[in-house]
Each structure stands twice: as C-alpha cells, then as structure tokens.
Image: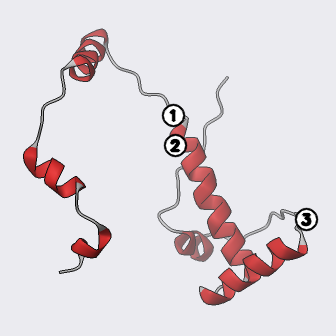
Amino acid sequence: MAKSLPAPAATAASTVSSRARTERLNLRTTAREDALIRAAAEIQDKSVSEFVLDAATEAAQNAILDQRSFRLSEKAWNEFIEYLDRPAVYKPKLAALMKLSPSDWTA
C-alpha cells in the first residue's frame, strides 16, 4: 500500500507558525560543513536549525515531486507521445534569446 505524503507547505515560515515542532533530527558534520552551514544561516538571519530545516524540507519536497507519476488515459497518452514525436520547429526569437548573455538581461 502506498503511503500518503503530506502536502508541501507553502513556505517554511508558515509551517513554523501553524504547528509546534515536536520531533528531533540529529546529524553529524565535519568542522568545515558546520562552519559553512553556520555562516549561511547567519547571512540569512536564521538559526542553524531554521536554516537546515528549511533547506532539508525544500530538498525533500523536490525529491518527492521528482518521483511523482502522472496517470493519463490512453487517448491523452497517445496525444502526449504525438507531441513528443513532432519534429522540432525553428523559432528565431527563441534562438536570439538563447544567444543573450546574463549581462544583456539587465537593461
């Protein structure tokens, strides 16, 4: 039987205000990892726990979303495959956009 996963929170901040945290995670780090995490947390004006929990929660949500499957009817599946099998169409505006460098984006 497949487990039902909780819906992703809109933001980590909304999770903090709406539910008390009662569970604990423990982890070990190297001195270098610890220093890196603490520096990043300070830059974002977060506690180490907040920083690590936010990062881990986002990574977990992305991992779960990447593994979701989508069910299609046979008709919808065939239409999807037809779209994938179509020959590529040259789009001049898209080609020009892809040639821009990041410095061209600020204008």
Q: Quadrant of residue 88?
A: top left
Query: Visible in this render: residue 80?
Result: yes
For mark 2, does the 10 Å Cα neighbourhood hold few (<14), some (14 to 19), or many (20 or more) residues? few
Q: Amino acid at mark 1?
A: Arg
Q: Position of residue 91 (x, y in %)?
A: 11, 41
In primary-sequence order, the first of circles 3 and 1 is 3
Give whichever of 52, 20 is nearer the camera: 52
In primary-sequence order, the first of circles 3 and 2 is 3
* Quadrant where the C terminus is found in the figure: bottom left
Vertical order, 5 against 61 (above or below): above
For mark 1, does the 10 Å Cα neighbourhood hold few (<14), some (14 to 19), or many (20 or more) residues? few
Give the label on residue 65, or none. Answer: 2
Nearer to us: label 3 or label 2: 3
Vertical order, 77 against 28 (above or below): above
Residue appearing at x 84%, y 62% in the figure: 25
Give whichever of 18, 86 is nearer the camera: 86
Left or right position of 45 against 80: right
Residue appearing at x 67%, y 75% in the figure: 51
Give whichever of 85, 104 is nearer the camera: 104
Check whether the beta carbons of the residues at disc 2 and disc 1 lie within 8 A of each other. Answer: yes
* Quadrant where the N terminus is found in the figure: top right
For mark 3, does the 10 Å Cα neighbourhood hold few (<14), some (14 to 19), or many (20 or more) residues? few
Q: Which residue is mark 1?
A: 68
Residue appearing at x 79%, y 67% in the figure: 22
Circle 1 sits in a helix, a strand or a loop, which is it? loop
Q: Quadrant of residue 105?
A: bottom left
Q: Amino acid at mark 3?
A: Arg
Q: Which residue is mark 3?
A: 28
Give whichever of 35, 61 is nearer the camera: 35
